Image (cartoon, rainbow, N blue to C red):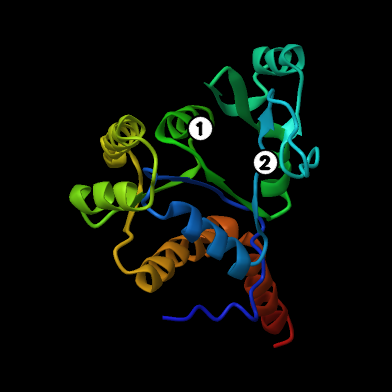
Amino acid sequence: MTLDLTRWEKPDLGALFVVSGPSGSGKTTLVRHALSVIPHVGFSVSATTRAMRPGERDSVDYQFLSRTDFDARLARGEFLEWAEVYGNRYGTPRAPVEEALSRGDSILLDIDTQGAAQVRERFPEAVTLFVLPPSVTALEARLRGRSTDAEAIIARRVHEAHVQLQECHLFQHLVVNDHLPAALDQFQAILVTHLLARSRREGWVRKIREEISSKADCR
């Protein structure tokens, strides 16, 4: 299946898509491809307290904040979700997401299940998707096959993947990434279907009604 979006018009109201899945599921590949082919869908720039690395740009790769600034924004409820990883804090700013949606632009978040739970609580309109491997055994093989790390590190990643998989039942949509071309089509079909919902296309409804009313007035 090939999505023909050459005549695509963005909706009146964009959608917030939350994508989760364990490491090795291929969710990042699905997200990146969707961003490259579906117009008016963007990726949220996260905020972080970690130091900027060489080659990174503020407000492009991340919004780099001091710990004090981050905590102040957190206290004001300015993040859709946040987490602390290895002593640094990461979060998704709420205001840029809401501004994008009001313009008809949509946002994709690639976050773990803990972050997805926070978004569901604070933004219940979000559309949630979980990317599954064909089997747990296949996922473990992927994680082991692509890594040269010590066994203890690999075992930790496998355990973390199991934790993520336990939450798949909490998501609205599931995509099994067994055959990549099929998974890409299914993933993008879910996004496009939600963006064509009548609730996001009031402009089309008004246009049709106005045309019918105009023709009736001319009789």
- Tell me the amino acid under the disc marked 1: Val
Q: Which mark is residue 91?
A: none
Quadrant placement of the C terminus = bottom right
Q: Which of the marked residues, 1 or 2, is nearer the chain's N terminus? A: 2
Q: Which residue is mark 2?
A: 97
Q: Quadrant of residue 71?
A: top right
Could you say whether the residue bearing mark 2 is in a helix, strand or loop? helix
Distance from Cα at disc 1 to Cα at disc 2 = 12 Å
- Answer with the quarter of the image where residue 64 lies: top right
Towards the viewer: 208 or 46: 46
Q: Is residue 24 left or right of residue 49?
A: left
Measuring from the top left, give residue 164's x and y in whole percent: 33, 36
Height in image: 106 above or below 165?
below
Q: Residue at x 65, y 44 (%)?
A: 44
Identify whether 216 is placed above or below 201: below
Front-lying residue, 57 or 166: 57
Front residue (pair 181, 81): 181
Q: Is residue 212 left or right of residue 56?
A: left
Q: Amino acid at mark 2?
A: Val
What percent of the width, then of the height, locates residue 79? 63, 26
Q: Are marks 1 and 2 in contact (CB under 8 Å)?
A: no
Q: Which residue is mark 1?
A: 119
131 in relation to 153, above or below: below
Position of residue 67 measured from the top left corner of the image (x, y, whole percent): 71, 15
Disc 1 crowd rating (10 Å Cα; few below 14, some 14-19, many 20+) is many
Residue ranking furthest to the bottom: 219
Check the image and report above or below for 7 versus 116: below
Measured as percent of width and height from the top left, residue 29 is found at: 49, 59
Q: Nearer the viewer, residue 180 or 124?
A: 180
Residue that appears at 44% across and 36% down = 112
- Pointer 2 local density, CA inside 10 Å: few below 14, some 14–19, many at least 20: many
